[in-house]
Image (cartoon, helix red, strand yellow):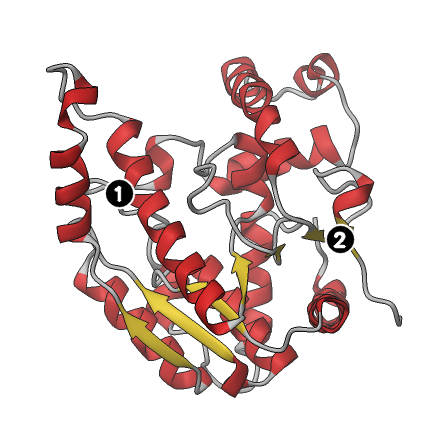
């Protein structure tokens, strides 16, 4: 995991990588979804510094499950960064989508990831609409913890031209956020302190689907960067049920990595294959 002395180096490396990626693509404008959460906040702050605030647009896409404080946090972030933003509510789009596809449910309308993923895919479509119309590259906001566990929707919140923080664990994203706020509060305090949630159903929290990140991340680090086996981690005294759960989710999610955008490389062991790494050209 990152030490305090690494944060500045990581921050500057990501900034350079984003600039190099856009220069190589011949693009100057970026778009991303702003949820009011920590991941999109960090990516927005990085984009504003790397590309200039006038070249970054955030799109807020609240649903009936989005909380007022999340929308307010996203607006406050955009104002703090000085980036442009638009609000496109998805509730009516989502309801119409469900109505038109009703025959495909064959009478079984119980709630599961089908409805959750549909919301994510509607948001991905809206972001790509903006990307196509305005020639802006879509920045992905998925972190390494989520990516390791498959906690993301293909063709939804996993879409994008560049995965900016996919080589940073969730706990490291918070460290980077604190560094970004070192001189002034760009990322709202409420974004830093609230429980992470995808807000795809009432009262949802990340911990409904994943172990708490402060417990999950050290195990993932041992598996990924440490190269330890399940047996070696168990020998260290880690709870067996926890390790088995992580291994199961990790294995089930591995197919998603083959369909994802390039990621900015930070660690010695990114999750994606070498052909998808993006590294700064100048160190």
Q: Quadrant of residue 207?
A: top left
Q: Position of residue 34 (x, y in %)?
A: 38, 64
Q: Residue at x 34, y 63 (%)?
A: 36
**SS under mark 2:** loop
Position of 58 with respect to 174 (left or right) is left
Relative to 57, say whether 115 is above or below: above
The circle on residue 200 is 1
Q: Is residue 34 visible?
A: yes
Q: Residue at the spot x=44%, y=60% of the render?
A: 38
Label 2, on which residue? 265
> Above or below — where is 6 with respect to 82?
above
At a point 77% along the width and 24% down the height, the residue shown is: 228
Which sits earlier in the primary sequence, circle 1 or circle 2?
Answer: 1
Callout 1: SS: loop
Question: Dot 2, how many residues are within 10 Å of its Cα: few (below 14), some (14-19), or many (20+)?
Answer: many
Q: Tell me the CA gap for discs 1 and 2.
A: 29 Å
Viewer-side residue, 174 vs 90: 90
Please state, as top left, top right, bottom left or bottom right, where the C terminus lies in the image: bottom right
Give the percent coordinates (x, y) of residue 251: 59, 19
Residue 202 appears anywhere in the view: no
Asked if the residue at tag 2 contacts the one at tag 1, i.e. Cβ–Cβ closer than 8 Å, the answer is: no
Q: Is residue 280 left or right of residue 109?
A: right
Whole-percent x and y of residue 244? Answer: 55, 14
Q: Is residue 148 rendered to the left or right of residue 111?
A: right
Q: Nearer the viewer, residue 6 or 137?
A: 137
Q: Residue at x 81, y 59 (%)?
A: 279
């Amino acid at each position: 995991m990152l030490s305090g002395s690494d944060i500045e180096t990581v921050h500057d490396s990501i900034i350079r990588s984003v600039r190099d990626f856009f220069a190589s693509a011949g693009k100057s404008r970026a778009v991303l979804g702003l949820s009011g959460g920590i991941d999109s906040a960090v990516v927005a702050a990085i984009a504003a510094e790397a590309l200039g605030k006038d070249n970054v647009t955030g799109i807020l896409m609240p649903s009936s499950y989005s909380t007022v404080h999340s929308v307010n946090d996203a607006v406050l972030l955009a104002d703090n960064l000085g980036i442009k933003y638009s609000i496109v509510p998805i509730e009516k789009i989502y309801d119409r989508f469900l109505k038109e596809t009703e025959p495909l449910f064959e009478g079984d309308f119980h709630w599961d990831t089908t409805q959750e993923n549909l919301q994510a895919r509607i948001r991905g479509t809206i972001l790509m609409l903006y990307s196509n119309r305005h020639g802006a590259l879509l920045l992905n906001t998925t972190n390494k913890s989520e990516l390791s566990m498959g906690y993301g929707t293909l063709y939804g919140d996993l879409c994008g031209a560049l995965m900016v923080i996919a080589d940073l664990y969730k706990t490291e994203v918070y460290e980077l956020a604190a560094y970004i706020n070192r001189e002034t509060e760009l990322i709202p305090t409420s974004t830093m302190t609230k429980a992470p949630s995808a807000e795809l159903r009432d009262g949802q929290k990340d911990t409904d689907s994943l172990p708490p990140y402060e417990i999950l991340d050290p195990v993932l680090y041992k598996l990924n960067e440490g190269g330890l086996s399940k047996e070696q981690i168990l020998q260290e005294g880690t709870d067996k049920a926890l390790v088995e759960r992580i291994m199961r989710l990790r294995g089930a999610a591995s197919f998603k990595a083959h369909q994802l955008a390039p990621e900015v490389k930070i660690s010695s062991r990114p999750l994606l294959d070498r052909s998808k790494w993006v590294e700064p050209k100048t160190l």
